[in-house]
Image: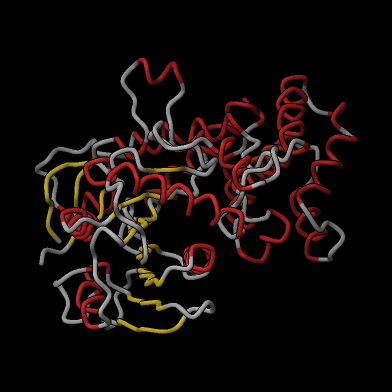
Amino acid sequence: MNVFGKSNVAEFLGDFVVYRNLIPMDDRLPSLRELRTRLDLPSNEIPRKHELSYARVIVELLREARRLDAPKAEIKRLVFIGDTRMSDGGAFDNICQVAGWEGIVFIGSENTESFEFESIQTPGGQSMVLSNRWSALNESEDYNLRRYCAVRGFPIDESTAVILDLDKTTLGARGRNSHVIDQARVEAVRQTVESLLGEAFNLDSFLNSYNQLNQPEFHPFTADNQDYLAYICLILGSGLYDSEKVIREVRGKRLLSFRQFIDQVETHKAQLAPSLQAIHESIYANVQAGDPTPFKAFRYNEYQNTVQRMGFLPDSTPPNILLREEIVLTHEVRALALDWKQEGALLFGLSDKPDEASIPTAELAEKGYQPLHRTPTHVVGKPK
């Protein structure tokens, strides 16, 4: 691994980025409100990544972005670079279906096993490449995405859109550097719960609840939503419910969903301390309004914990320490993006990280904080 100085995602994406709320960072692009009207979508819903309505919004944003950069060009092809086969692959298939584009999706997740580069067909009939090396994006490996596109007669030019997943792909590559993103989130949960519980906070009890409920076994209950999990840990830490009893009820199918849990808390909220009643009422109102990011205090802490782990180490720091302690920019993604941008492709970034965890508050912005895609950090990866 080598260090390639410092940069940020905006070097190659500019502000062609949307986070979870689908609010374009480039204000030249249409707002979600405008797109809802144009696409006849429900006025009070934010489409999620797995939904066809999400794909419809992204297709419109890509077409509008292409008009800004190359008014005479028409998108005909899509390359999607991500880290999760189900989430990114599903979104990719939906986008290709909605737009009628030919596509290739690359899913990377690094490990220490022998090099793998597998080509399969997606459920939507498109091409998917699976690899356990991020270096398979370029000529660092004999089998790589650049060569794969060339062999298949898949040109990268003004008629090609390239979507880069941000979390655990462009930043904090999965299997190589993603653990630092996870550390930032867990620390944000801990800080939030501890600040609200005060002297009643018990670190061992918190870690036990968080680590257990964060497992796939409990995803039907938590909806694999970190806001929900943070709230559950807060309530368990308050003593309103016993964690082992809650776990037994989930496993026994008596407690089926987060909504059922928070409705029960609403019934017994008078037993909470006044400060916890207030935070519960705020979160409960957000949940009722359909907000997928209801625990705002946690997400604001997550933003600060994330940016604090970006670019803070000296430039002379060895790459293995940078990968262990910083959230770094993936060199292979950056190199590919810069080359393909030079060849005329449209580059666009998607993130499922909540806006509250990705963009500074007005107060922090005044102090010089930037959105994650504009925050400088070290670039680390395998050279060609």
**Left or right relative to 143: residue 316:** left
Q: Is residue 220 visible in this depiction of the protein? A: yes
Which residue sits at x=60%, y=56%? 214
Q: Is residue 242 shown above or below 27?
A: below
Q: Position of residue 179 (x, y in %)?
A: 39, 54
Q: Is residue 1 shown above or below 107?
A: above
Question: In terms of depth relative to the viewer, which is nearer, 30 or 121?
Answer: 30
Question: In terms of depth relative to the viewer, which is nearer, 245 or 24?
Answer: 24
The image quadrant of residue 5 is top left
Which residue sits at x=79%, y=47%? 259
In this view, which residue lies farthest toward the front? 72
**Left or right relative to 330: residue 210:** right
Q: Position of residue 124 (x, y in %)?
A: 52, 77
> In the rendered view of the protein, which quadrant contains the C terminus?
bottom left
Q: Is residue 79 shown above or below 222?
A: below
> In the rendered view of the protein, which quadrant contains the N terminus?
bottom left
Which residue sits at x=30%, y=81%? 117
